[in-house]
Image (cartoon, rainbow, N blue to C red):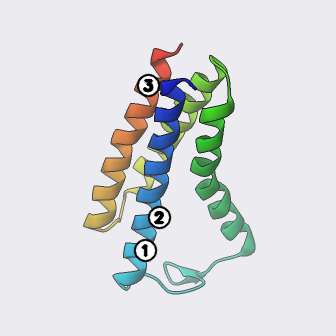
């Protein structure tokens, strides 16, 4: 198997773990009320949207391994840039530990783009 495919897959695993670590830290820091976001009840549509966003890195792990180039590269570049933008917008109002984790994920997004770009 191509080393770049394995590296891209591992980077997506790292991103997913960073996002999950942020969720766990928010729970333990007390910034979490079950079924609510910012004091408002969460609808099933919002839960579905969050599930879709959180499953994307998992899907990218698999796609990074099975897709051929150049489609593999383009999908990795596009999704990494979208996650970078999504997380950049979401940084407003985050706690310090969340911002730290998101900045680390930005580094992984940049690595994803860099490695995927080398295969174009």
The foreground one among 99 and 9 is 9
> Alpha-carbon neighbours of circle 2 within 10 Å: few (<14), some, or many (≥20)?
few
User: What label does residue 20 carry, if any?
Assistant: 2
Q: Residue at x 71, y 65 (%)?
A: 48
Q: Are marks 2 and 1 in contact (CB under 8 Å)?
A: yes
As drawn, 78 above or below 45: above
Task: Kindly state the secondary structure of the residue where label 2 is placed.
Answer: helix
Viewer-nearest residue: 99 or 19? 19
- For the residues marked 3 and 1, what is the alpha-carbon distance in whole angstroms? 29 Å
User: Based on the displayed image, in which of its 4 quarters is residue 111 positioned?
Assistant: top left
Q: Looking at the picture, how far across and down is residue 37, in whole percent? A: 53, 77
> Looking at the image, which residue is at 41% across and 57% down?
18
Camera-side residue of 102 and 36: 102
- Residue at horizontal 70 percent and vertical 76 percent from the top: 43
Cα–Cα span, label 2 and label 1: 6 Å
Give the x, y percent position of residue 92: 37, 59
Residue at 59% in and 57% down: 54
Is 75 rendered above or below residue 14? above
- Of pointers 2 and 3, the one earlier in the residue sequence: 2
- Real-space Cα distance between discs 2 and 3? 24 Å
User: Residue 72 appears in which quarter of the rendering?
Assistant: top right
Identify the mark nearer the N-term, 3 or 1: 1
The secondary structure type at the circle numbered 3 is helix
Q: Position of residue 41 (x, y in %)?
A: 62, 83
Residue hosting label 1:
24
> Total number of numbered labels?
3
Quarter that holds the N terminus? top right
User: Mark 3 and 1 residues: CB-CB less than 8 Å, in contact?
Assistant: no
- Residue beneath disc 3: 115
Q: Is residue 27 above or below residue 76?
A: below
Q: Secondary structure at mark 1?
A: helix
């Amino acid at each position: 198997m191509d080393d770049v495919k394995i590296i891209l897959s591992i980077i997506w695993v790292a991103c997913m773990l960073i996002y999950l670590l942020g969720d766990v830290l928010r729970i333990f820091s007390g910034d979490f009320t079950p079924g609510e976001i910012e004091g408002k009840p969460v609808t099933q549509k919002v839960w579905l949207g969050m599930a879709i966003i959180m499953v994307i890195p998992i899907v990218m792990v698999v796609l990074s391994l099975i897709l051929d180039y150049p489609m593999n590269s383009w999908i990795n570049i596009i999704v990494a840039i979208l996650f970078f933008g999504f997380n950049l917008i979401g940084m407003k109002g985050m706690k310090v530990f969340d911002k730290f984790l998101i900045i680390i994920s930005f580094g992984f997004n940049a690595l994803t783009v860099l490695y995927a770009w080398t295969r174009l």
